[in-house]
Image: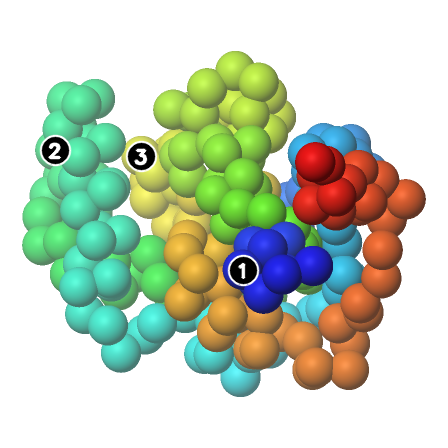
Amino acid sequence: MNEQLQKMVSEKTLVLFKPDTLQRAITGEVLARLERTGLKMVACKMVLPNREILDGHFPTSDENWIRGMGEKSLETYKELGIDPVGALGTADALEIGKRILEWNYAYLSSGPVLAIVFEGIHAVASVRKIIGSTIPSKALPGTIRGDYSINSPDLANMIGSACKNMIHASGNLEEAENEVKNWFRPEEIISWERSEDYFHFLAGEFTK
């Protein structure tokens, strides 16, 4: 296998099945849908996340990222005609983002999380596509969030909770690399071949 092809087929992404997915006993259904894409699971473990691992997971030093979470909530409020000041006491995106960050800490540490590393061509983009919008109420039918959840930021913020959107998946290659290192030790990632790997990735190299 040439070097460029090897790089393509070994792309990795982190997926977290959040506590609500495990509590609803739909882990197997969701996992099967991800595996059917042709991606290969190369690491998997159940974790009770603590503050240390979540500090490594969230880019808490990136103020723009925190503000972006608040802006998403404000967009939803605007669409639904909800006054954020009346609902939250503020319309400041950064302040709202900070609250959401703490709610996410509480959410992810509320129960076990299933952490998985998937490997394969365009792994990051493929997983993001199949799980759908981070706001479940906006996720398209056929995506995991679109089929299994209707949660939304306006509901979550009103009750002082993170938006329970079932799954986390790395947003880009750099994020994936950092997240995989945060959740898994190198020896926990297993290199192996699926029976169909040859037909997907190798057979064409020998085609005249």
Q: Are marks 1 and 2 in contact (CB under 8 Å)?
A: no
Q: Please tell me whether mark 1 sits on a helix, a strand or a loop.
A: helix
Query: Which label belongs to residue 4?
Result: 1
54 to the left or right of 33: left
Q: What separation in Å lies between label 1 and label 2 (alpha carbons)?
A: 51 Å
3 to the left or right of 79: right
Q: What separation in Å lies between label 3 and label 2 (alpha carbons)?
A: 10 Å
- Local crowd size for mark 1, using a 10 Å CA cut-off: few (<14), some (14–19), many (≥20): few
- Specify which label sits upstream in the sequence, 1 or 2: 1
Task: Answer with the quarter of the image where residue 159 lies.
Answer: top left
Visible residue check, residue 149: no
165 to the left or right of 156: right
Visible residue check, residue 59: yes
Q: Residue furthest front?
A: 208
Residue named by callout 3: 154
- Looking at the rendered image, the disc whose residue lies closer to the viewer, 3 or 1, is 1
Residue named by callout 2: 83
Task: Answer with the quarter of the image where residue 62 lies.
Answer: bottom left
Q: Please tell me whether mark 3 sits on a helix, a strand or a loop.
A: helix
